Image (tube, grey):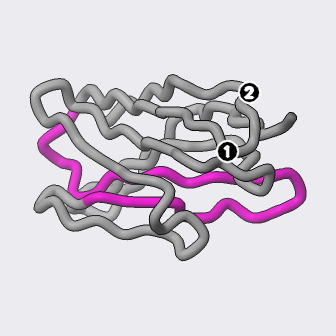
Amino acid sequence: QVQLVESGGGLVQPGGSLRLSCAASGSIFSINVMGWYRQAPGKQRELVASITSGGSTNYADSVKGRFTISRDNAKNTRDLQMNSLKPEDTAVYYCNAGTWSKVDYWGKGTLVTVSS
């Protein structure tokens, strides 16, 4: 079992920045990839960014150049630095962990609201 706890959401003005953090605990050794997804009202959940155990990253086209995913293996955290935020980035952001055995774990989510 893997437990994920997100933090760092909130209200920010357009053009501002936020940093989300996801702390993983439990069977950390079983994790192959971790990432951030988001779900806006009335829309499907979508991948924002991911990072594999080998350090390879992947980003949605809509956030490339603005968001950066990083990891701290000592702390078992994966952070998402979000810059130049836009109103369309407003969503609930979820941390995800995928294991080598193709099991997915999810955090409860953290709300990011971009509004003036």
Q: Nearer the viewer, mark 2 or mark 1?
A: 1
- The residue singled out by tag 2 in the image is 11
Element carrying mark 2: strand
Amino acid bearing label 2 = Leu
Which amino acid, by three-letter code, is at mark 1?
Gly
The secondary element bearing badge 1 is classed as: loop
Q: Is residue 87 left or right of residue 79?
A: right
- Residue farthest to the front, as pictured: 15
Tell me the quarter of the image containing the C terminus: top right
Question: Is 101 covered by the magenta stretch?
Answer: no
> Mark 1 and mark 2 in contact (Cβ < 8 Å)?
no
Residue in the picture at 67% in, 60% down = 45
Looking at the image, residue 96 sits to the left or right of residue 101; the answer is right
Image height check: is 65 above or below 1? below
Can you give x and y, in whole percent of width and height, for residue 27 in the image?
20, 35
x, y percentage for residue 17? 56, 37
Disc marking residue 15: 1
Assign the N terminus to one quadrant of the image. Answer: top left
Q: What residue is at 84 percent from the left and 37 percent from the top?
A: 115
Q: Which residues are magenta?
A: 27-51
In this orientation, which residue lies closer to the viewer: 55 or 106?
55
Say the numbered circle drawn on residue 30: none
